[in-house]
Structure formats: structure tokens, C-alpha cells
Image (cartoon, helix red, strand yellow):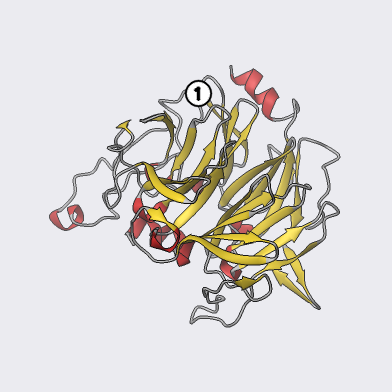
Amino acid sequence: MRKIFTWFMSMLILSGVGYNIPQNKSYVVTVADSAVDGNDTVSFNLPMGVFSGNNGELYVLDTYNNLIHKINVHGDASLFAGEILMLDTLRLPRGFYNDGILEEALFNRPTSGVMDASGRIFIADRTNHAIRMIADGYVYTFAGGEAGYRNGQGSDVMFYYPTALAMDRRGNLFIADTGNNAIRRIAPNGHVTTVAGVAGEYGFRDGIAGQALFNQPMGIAVRFDGVIIVADSGNHLIRTITGRRVDTLAGVYQLPEEKLTEDEQADDWVQQPIGGFADGAPSVAMFNIPMGLALWRDKIIVADSVNHAIRAILPTGEVITITGTGYPGYIGGSVEAAYFHLPQAVYILDDKLVIVDTGNNMIRILALTVDNLEAKCETSA
């Protein structure tokens, strides 16, 4: 794996509870930081994803515990699937790979999930290079399971660190296949194809989808009209896929200005684009490893991870900051004062914005109303 990815994951080194609607809707509150497993309480360990069920419950991808938790509408969090068997040399739970009933299934850094209309759950089991499916109390491998790149069906398919999932209205499952720098699709019949990107190549290039280049995409969403939104994390950009074309929606692609030595020119990490933090028009706004994406009305919400902020892209393309200061920390309260630490995913549940505050090991929530996002939209226009 290239250095940007290993560097980013290694910097994720490193509390609040209750699924309650904020009384003051301009405030960020904490939903959960732990879950009950029998007689034990399991603290979250760098969670990276969240999604909801058809009855309003939340599912948390507790990534570095290799577990999936469920938070019911009353705020009670409990273990849903997975098991911790042993710790590695860094004292982190080791990941494994096993299909089976919920209590016996094993995962290896699960990062994202979605539920379809029939109640089936799909999980991006990143370090197992697989898309898993949960149905009728059983965990299956839906596609993949071996590192590499290959289209097809079932176990013939190969992914390389799939990180994010999104589903359209027709039941197509879209995957940010991070290590392959590609966007893949699983059709309802289970067949896997590549939507955009050139597997094995990274960089930045807009244009025809099959020739466009990405740099470790880690976030994805699908608009009601079928347009795919991609967080091109390594390029610090938000991109769109419309039909067979890839375009940059917002962000600045910027390489280091200093002249590189011969050794530095051979160093993958030194060659990487640099991020920044700036609101404004799409051609001047800057992100720093944007990851999770969510859609609220006609706006795109972005978990801007290394800026420790939650951003929004307006219909005009203008980028604003909803909450977060650009500095890591943990403070609740008003959107102007709240601090986050490497937020990596966002999810819309009704008009509530659920935030996976990864570095703080918390799930936090903010009601989206005229008091915060829409007010900022009006004053930014």
C-alpha cells in the first residue's frame, strides 16, 4: 500500500451518550462512545462508519475493534456482530475473516455499511478486501475476499481496501475501492464492474470515466438523479461521475511548490498533493483528506477529516464550514465552538446529521435547520 494511505491510518492514534434530539438545534451533542456486550461495555476504537436501519436504529462500524454495534432509537447501544479474539503487537484487536451467525462472524477493519429496502446489510470489510452481506442473522461474503483487482461475480471478484459504500434507488451498490483508485459497482444480480478510474494507477485527471484518475478515494454518495459524488481523499477534492464522465466539483489540486531532489522524486509520499482549509467558490475552496459524504436536500455534506471539520457544498458549488475549527479536540455545544478529531463519516437520518468523530471515538449528532446550515447558506450567498 502506498505511503499516503499507511501514513493517514497511522496518524489515527488516538468520550457522552444517548440517542437524543438536541433541544437547542444549533448544538452538537454526543450520541454514544461505547456499547454493551453481555455483561461488558466495549468502548469504541476508531469507528469509521455509521448507517441506519429501516426502523431508525443506527449501526456503528467500530473499525479497530472489528465490531458492528447497534444503537436503538432510545439510545441503547449493543453489540450487533463480530467478536474480539486477540490483540496484535500494538495492543489493537486483530482482525479475522469468518462467515457465520452474527455472534461468530469475524471482520477485519469494517469501515462502511448500507441497508437496502429489503433489510439486507452490506459492509465494506476493508482489510479483508471483501463486501460482506448480513441477512437473516447470518454474515455472508457477497463479493471479493482477496486483495487485487478483478471484475466478475462473487468470490472471483477482487478488491483492494474497499472503504466506502453507497446504494442508488435501483439497488446498485457503489464502492470506493481505495487501494485500486477506482469506483466499482455491484449490480442487483451481483455482477461487479468498474465505473471510473484506472486500476493500479493514481493521479488526477478529469474526463472520460474509464481514463480518469483518482488518488485513494475514501467517500462516496449517490444523488437521486444518479450522479455519483466521490471524496477523492488523496487529491483533497470532491469529484462527480455523471454518465461516463468525471469532473471536479470542488477543491484545489495542488502539488508542493519546492523543487524536489532526485531521491524525493522517487518518493511516493513527497509527490502527494497538499491539502488546505478554505471556504469559498469551488475553484478556491480547499479540503484536507475529505472522507465521508452525505446528501441533505440539495447540499453535499463532507467529513473533512484532517481539517477536523464538517463542510458543506451548496448547489452553487460554494463550500462552507458547518462546524469545526480546523484544530483537533473535543468540545460539544454550539456549531461555532464545537471541536472534532479526525471526523471520517457523516450520515443523514431525517434532518439530523450523524457524525463519526473517529479520533474522539464518538458518535455525535447535529440537527440541520435554518439555525445552522441554512442560515450559513444564506449569509454565504
Whether residue 15 appears in this view of the structure is: no
Q: Secondary structure at mark 1?
A: loop
Q: Position of residue 229 (x, y in %)?
A: 49, 35
- Residue 104 x/y as whole percent: 64, 76
Residue at 68 percent of width and 37 percent of height: 336
Q: Which image quarter is the N terminus in?
A: bottom left
- The correct choice, above or below, for 237 with respect to 331 in the image is above
* Furthest-left residue in this view: 262
Quarter-of-image position of residue 6? bottom left
Of the 4 image quadrants, the one containing the C terminus is top right
Residue at the image position 45 percent from the left and 55 percent from the top: 162
- Counting labels gives 1
Mark 1 closeness class: few <14, some 14–19, many ≥20 residues within 10 Å? some
Q: Is residue 216 visible?
A: yes
Q: Residue at x 18, y 56 (%)?
A: 266
Q: Nearer the viewer, residue 170 or 284?
A: 170
Residue 62 figure quarter: bottom right
Q: Is residue 80 left or right of residue 252?
A: right
Name the residue that disc number 1 marks: 317
Expressed as whole percent of the image width and height from the top left, the position of residue 245 reads: 36, 29
Residue closest to the eye, 79 or 375: 79
